[in-house]
Image (tube, rainbow, N blue to C red):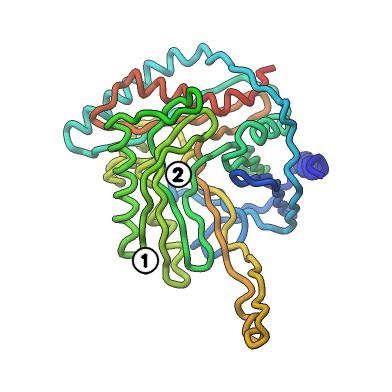
Amino acid sequence: MMQELFHRAENCLKEQLPFVLYSKPNDIELVGVFQNNDDVHKVMDFTETGFVFAPFDLNSDAILMKMDAVDKVPLNLNDEFQVSEKNIPESEATEKERYLILISKAIERIGKGDFNKVVLSRKIEVDVKDNYFEVYQRILQVYKKAFCYFWYHPKIGIWMGATPEILIKSNGTQFTTMSLAGTQNAIGANEPMWAEKELDEQQLVTDYILDTLKDKVISLNSSERESVKAGQLWHLRTEIKGAFAPNKFGDILKALHPTPAVCGSPLENAKNFILENELYERNFYTGFLGELNTKTELPRNSNRRNQENSAYRSVMKTSELFVNLRCMQLFKEKVEIYVGGGITSDSIPEKEWEETALKSNTMFRVLDGK
């Protein structure tokens, strides 16, 4: 059944019709969403229904894929699949020098008080002639705890990724979001020891989200901070839950994106530094994607006295959106892998470079490199 879904997507690729394949974290289901024509639908106010693919900068267009057809099949994976570690491209030496200068510039601006954190990113070009569907199968196999997607629109391009971070999940007017920051390599099964810099960086994100949402929601609370594993990496996470007023989901979404975890703080100052100094377009990297306002049927109340009212309570709007981290854009003979990291006054440029190299392995590991 999974191969049939891949075959349908392969035909769409040949016929240049938009589709997205995705699997949610720890799920046993692969979902395919197919649009019947190659129209580019733009999100106006996030009241629309479909699969949304939004850029880092919401001044650019967020794209909505219409759910003209939706297929769901069991996720059958080959557990014997092996990935091999790849060599970093030689072009990285030049890129390293540029990136270290950029980090030093950011630290200098932090010292002047322009902002206290900024997330700097870069992209790595790799020559690859892989079969797209084989690459995606490797992603599904290796990153079962992530949101794994393969997104295609003939007028925009091909993107794939395995992101561990939920931007927001909503059921009716209830929502959950998270503060995710800090990165360490996973060595064995033991949880990592976190440095003060990493703890402070994650706390900045948590405080920002709570402060940003407090005047826009009806209720708000946060969990204890915990260490969570995503692939070969550990991160720090705090879960935040609450409720919003009816028809205010778009306001919550715009308030949340971008968070300090992908931009910095204060937000506007950090964002301006990024747009002026990164010297490349992030496009959909550090944007968000997922199901927007899909209708979910709830179990009907079996109590006879409530059956008359049950029809009015049986459908609820749900959204499940993920931050587009650990991703790449695929072309005919190359891929562009996007990586980044948070810079604060305590940052050491060499270590920040190493962190981005570590993060790039998420996508390097699934490329065959033919």
Q: Mark 2: few, some, or many residues within 10 Å (few <14, many ≥20)? A: many
Quadrant of the image occupied by residue 133: top right
Along the line of sight, the residue nearer the viewer: 302 or 279: 302
**Residue visible at 77% across and 40% down in the picture:** 6
Up the image or down, 312 lies above or below 101; here it is below
**Residue 280 position within the rendered picture, expressed as x and y whole percent measured from the top left:** 44, 31
Q: Residue at image x 66%, y 42%?
A: 152
Mark 1 vs 2: CB contact within 8 A: no
Residue 26, horizontal then vertical, whole percent: 61, 44
Q: CA distance from mark 1 to mark 2?
A: 27 Å
Q: Residue at x 68, y 45 (%)?
A: 21
* Residue at the disc numbered 1: 219
Q: Position of residue 164 (x, y in %)?
A: 51, 40
| Residue 56: numbered disc | 2
Which residue is most to the left? 112
Q: Is residue 172 left or right of residue 93?
A: right
Q: Amino acid at mark 2?
A: Phe
Q: Amino acid at mark 1?
A: Ser
Q: Nearer the viewer, residue 168 or 96?
A: 168
Q: Is residue 290 left or right of residue 119?
A: right
The structure residue drawn at horizontal position 67% and vertical position 21%, both measured from the top left corner, is 368
Quadrant of the image containing the C terminus: top right
Q: Nearer the viewer, mark 1 or mark 2?
A: 1
Q: Which mark is residue 298?
A: none
- Circle 1 SS class: strand
**Quarter assignment of residue 343:** top left
Q: Which mark sits nearer the N-terminus, 1 or 2? A: 2
Q: Secondary structure at mark 2?
A: loop
Quarter in which the N terminus is drawn: top right
